[in-house]
Image (cartoon, rainbow, N blue to C red):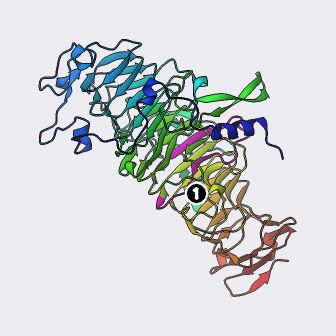
Amino acid sequence: MAATKFETSLTRRKLLTGLGASGALGAAFVARPDMAIAGAQTLAEYCGLVTPGQANIGTASHATPDGGATPDGSFRSWNDPAAWPDGKVPGPHDKAVVTKHIVASGDVTVGGIEIRQGGLLRYEPNTPTTIQSRGNVVVAGCLTMRPSSHAVVHTLRFIEVDESKYVGGGMDVLDSDVGLWVVGDGVLDAVGAQRTAWSRRGDDPTWLPTDELIVAPNAPGDFTSFAPFRKGAAVPTVAGPGGATHATEVANLSRNVWIEGTAGGRAHIMFLHCHKPQTIKHIGVMYMGPRQNTSETVRGNSGTRFLTEAVLGRYGLHFHHCGDGTRGSLVEGVVVRNGGGNAFVPHESHGITLRDCVAYEVYDNGFWWDLGHVSHDTRLEHCAALMIRTDPDFRGYGTSGFTMGEGLNNTASDCVAVGVRSGGVNAGGFLWSAAANHKKHNVWAFTDCVAHNNREIGFATWQNDVNDHLIERIVSYHNRTGISHGAYQNRYHYRDSVSFGNDYELAHRAVGPITFERMTFDGDVRIGPHALESHEECRYLDCRITGKIVIDEGDEKPGIFHFVSSAKEFDLGPERFEVLRRLSTVKVTNSDGRSFVVG
């Protein structure tokens, strides 16, 4: 089938990575492997929080908004002309070049910021401070945002951004692609007041009564209603099999450190070839991820409009080709919200931990990196993807809350995906993508994750390889399909998991040595067509299936399926099978040792 204009446009954009020349600011900051900061012994020393052999410096008392140096000479005020290379305080359309240690306090607007190697720009800890920039903020030194209390808000805001001018892709800073660029040995040291990002309790000691809270939908068929929530209110629950109660999720969207664009001008954050670990905790990232019109149109209730697509490489929080330089980086308690593209992207950047993070109301994917590329030692711990959109919603092949990308020693635990709105094939909460087929490094340690109230699939696999994959203790409910397992042949092992309240609890397409062990399917299971033949047995071991087992294999290839029970509660009779078209051998062995073949 011929590609659509939309698909052709998207392919062309991916091929055009690196187009466009860097402007003056961009040209100065092409990341190089030999970048180094002389005399920087530790992150704290580099960021000016501690000098070698001395106690902490740069406390609130050192801020001097009216100009002049700090008492010990370590910091100068933004308003001190002596702080700047040209002896002039930058104006609202000037580029601020930071070569010294500078404290910003109050409200500042500039044309752009360049923090050079050895330079440090620090927000005054005890003073609400907003820096607005019309152009790029490029950090080869250090940018520090650490307010002293909940009451102090630090904001870096990009203004007057024109999303239509973005080029995307490439390995250089581009003046056209306005955002925060942390390059080489640059460091973003941003730590807000501690807030638990999400829970199922409806309250938390770190939450304030004034915080913006939202509750995820849990009613069948609802994948859009994320409603305001009051701290301490009762959390909606649903009853699952065996008397279990499943509470939905409450997320806290408030932070006191913000890096943001505007609703009409989204910017981005990129760590480009960084060589130092980053510390980013309890901050908010809003209005990031620019989008542009494609040549394709769609007609809706409000008339005809152009479809949009994300700008390649310009995402909410993007680590780009940092390799081992990001090992030890911690992104904790961060919310990326109201974004136009992927939220969290650790792309070919290793050793990053994402803990208690939330992607909320973003486009395309919540947690993702470029398909076919590798990131090693990634840890996703207690993260949430909530309301993931595509344009239009009825498309979005492979759109997901979490895409389980390629790499070594990657883990995901206690994560949740709710409200993935795409109606595309293999779109859903968690996706093991076909892009990792036959790859040496595509196995995740995957435990204790939940997917509910997604438009299509809770957990989707579409891979062909011989690696052994283990998926444990997952819960999937109120999706169209609880678990969709394909593509043709693989070696997956699902264990101790529950799927309920879906149209189909399991859609089983792949063949080969696949195992479902101690699973609860509280509804119908469907064994569908298989593109390849297999002589290896797929086993269902002690699985509780309350609905029909529908066999509808079409005109494709046969496999072997064996349902094995060690206790009467898991036994199956011939009446439990609804055979529409069977090509495979389907055998049942019950707890008394008796067997039969499904006819």
The quarter holding residue 312 reads: top right
| In this picture, residue 77 sits left or right of residue 23 | left
Q: Main secondary structure of the magenta part?
A: loop
Kind of residue at disc 1: Val
From the viewer's side, name the closer residue of 554 and 478.
554
- Give the residue drawn at x 51%, y 51%: 415
| In this picture, residue 597 sits left or right of residue 227 | right
Instruction: Give how far across and how far down residue 508 sits, in percent.
Output: 72, 64
| In this picture, residue 589 sits left or right of residue 117 | right
From the viewer's side, name the closer residue of 383 and 453.
383
> Magenta residues, as a range?
381-410
**How many numbered callouts?**
1
From the viewer's side, name the closer residue of 78 and 283.
78
Magenta region includes residue 384? yes
Instruction: Give how far across and how far down residue 5 sits, in percent.
Output: 77, 35
Mark 1, residue position: 475
Residue lying farthest bottom?
593
